[in-house]
Amino acid sequence: MQKLYYLFFLVCCSISVTIAQNIQSPSEFLGYELGTKFSRHAQVVDYFQHVEATVPNQVKMEKYGETYERRPLYVTYISSEENMRNIETIRENNLKNAGILDGDSNTNNVAIVWMSYNVHGNEASSTEASMKTLYELLTTNKDYLENTVVIIDPCINPDGRDRYANWYNTTASTPYDIDPQSSEHIEPWPGGRPNHYLFDLNRDWAWASQIESQGRLKIYNKWLPHIHVDFHEQGYNEPYYFAPAAEPFHEVISDWQRDFQTQIGKNHAKYFDANGWLYFTRERFDLFYPSYGDTYPTYMGAIGMTYEQGGHSRGGLGVLNDEGEVLTLVDRLTHHTTTGLSTVEIASKNAEKLNEEFRNFFNTSGLKYKSYVMKGNEDKIEALKSLLDKHEIKYGNAKGGKVNGFAYGSNSNGSLNSSTSDLVVSTNQPKGKMVKALFEPNGKLSDSLTYDITAWSLPYAYGLETIASTSLIGSDAASSPEKVNAISNGYGFVSNWNSMKDAKFLADLLKQNFKVRFTDKPLYQNGEKFERGSLIILKGDNYRLTDFHAALNDTAIKHNQPLVSIQSGFSDRVPDIGSPDIKLVNKQRIAMLSGDGTSSLHYGALWHFFEQQLNYPVTSINTEHLNFVDLSKYNVLIMPSGNYRSSLNEDAMTALKAWVRKGGKVIAIDRALSTFAGQEGFALKRNENESEDSKNLTPYANRERENAKNLITGAIFESKVDNTHPMAYGYDNNYFTLKLGSASYSLLDRGFNVAHLGENPMQVSGFAGSNAIKKLDNSLIFGEERMGRGSIIYMVDNVNFRSFWENGKLFLVNAIFFVNNNAFVL
């Protein structure tokens, strides 16, 4: 019997060795030593498919989407043969453990580790490391897989990675040049960091504006791993960073999550110490902003971590750092492979504890606020519900009645008379801690020095009147908006103007060559009042259209846009439909600056806004060509946040002013305002504050923390709005604005101050330094300056930042279509 057992053991070992021998290493498969070239995304996918085909009982790939440039997105599951046979049971038991699925969980002693690579395309060593990590797990470290399921996403951002890899492979010298000043170490605009639309996908987990994020969330929420690692790179003069993270930690993070980060870090340190590699922990990279690849998983119960290798886009295949050492791509991928394998190792050793603490995380009974009740425009509520659906967060409609609690509008205790159309989101659900992180009025900061913005509260972002209640508010199943009915014949039709849904409807009509009017004064028809900005589509204006009613009806149904029929141009009160205050909307021809000087991320957010949200054409003009462009072909020129001083030289500025005077409209956003501030002929002026340390006596060691007094790291303030101005149509007389920095501008002494901060403006969320706040009194948020027949629109705060501040986007649409709507042709 012992002989038979011994023979069986030898056969099993022989089969295992044979399988390992049949798996080609990445270098063998690719035909070059890993790390001596940058692999294209297709080659990486091919390698993973080779491994899957070689060991199908241990490796399974799943396609979860495609990028905007049609590159495939995959995750790969790796585990023991037994675990792979039971993979669906393991997944379901894990979701039962979290309370996502009903039923008792059979005890899972299997750890689930998810490793995400190359979210920033030009931090390219990690995708190379993903191939080596896959190979090592199935050969030299296969014991880890006995009680661990590893999920590898080898490249979250293939479009950005290939943009970088293709540029580098085209540009690099042979042999590679280690001089950091050489061209192969300096990427051209826009760089490979972002995706196709130039979004930073590592800031998009919570907002899910991009197709890559949306696909990833679907599959991530099918699993909810116990550990999630996001592999990154930092500057080439930096060593390696791994957990534990720096303060601030969000307060929903459990003591266990904090402690286990430290255990993981010490396990990594063991390997780095043995090799004499430098590293640091507990600095720079905090766990607060909820839309990162470390925080989002953390708020979903995982041990979420960022690993940062020195290198980044300037690393190339090899670069000489400031300490005189050559850092190679081989070094970088080796370090990432080491931390990846170390993570799986410690997860395997603590699988039972990981499952136990994962289950404990989803106990939400200790959260202060039990429910968030929101009232507001139906379109805005539907937009918020769409976001919640992406995260599989539950919600319902209120039952009605008075709700007491913290009132967001007043930043104090208050009440709300709820109706059955109001939205209720409760923390009494498995994802209640994520609900808290996204909805709480003001997150608790343990340290003011943070890596990103410190305010994002969704009720402010979506412009909804909200009460946070310490009581659990009952709700019914959420209802969907009623479908609009077909329109009947009439003199014309009126549509309200309140939301981006209304804006999309307008954009679609204009693209179909409908003539559309808007009202500059409240309109009274059929016993109803229509506020400023309401759209009016008249049969008489559109007599050239074939079958006006059918085309309008189809468009209204497509957008589910309610239209009110009017039978006469004679209104209940002035203005009548023929009044000069009822104006045609111009079919604007829009240009937007891009290229050097322009913030690629801010340009990308606007590009995505026009193509994927508003669905209205825009022409991108490279700043290098600005002097040669015929601006007379456009009505509107948008300047995304950026520095345009070199592009707008004296001649270009003279030409721009002439174009504006003839009826052109410039929309300058965020840092683009510095182009005009204090310049001759413009009313815009900066607010400056004298430094308290005018004698420059702050100790060197205190400089960073003292400087925080001058910063605003994404804070929310209440602004006052002149909603009689066309730029503010659809808004109330106040607006909660997200300030991303400390830049402050005086109120315009000529023109229109559309939105501004008053004396001692109310700050409701986020960090703002004491010196920075002093500059905000009576400062501009949005304004219009007239110049001849045209206008300069100043948008101090960027309403399209990361595409999540939904309530601000209509200001931009109004600026394009309604403000100074006086010229068809320049």
Image (cartoon, helix red, strand yellow):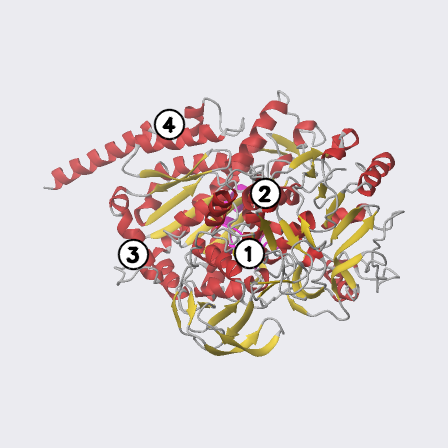
Q: Is residue 314 visible?
A: yes
Residue that mark 3 sits on: 93
Instruction: Tell me which amino acid carries mark 2.
Output: Asn
Q: Is residue 328 above or below residue 250?
A: above
Give the label on residue 190, or none: none
Q: Which tag, 2 or 4, sits closer to the chain's start?
A: 4
> Where, quadrant-wise, is the C terminus in this rendering?
top right
Residue that mark 4 sits on: 24
Residue 17, image x, y percentages: 29, 32
Q: Is residue 185 above or below residue 717?
A: above
Please state which of the two labelled residues, at mark 1 or mark 3, is closer to the viewer.
1
Instruction: Tell me which amino acid carries mark 1.
Output: Gln
Residue at image coords 12%, 38%? 4
Instruction: Tell me which amino acid carries mark 3.
Output: Asn
Residue that mark 1 sits on: 567
Q: Which tag, 4 or 1, sits closer to the chain's start?
A: 4
Q: Is residue 477 above or below residue 402?
A: above
Residue at image coords 55%, 46%? 613
- SS at circle 3: helix
- SS at circle 2: helix
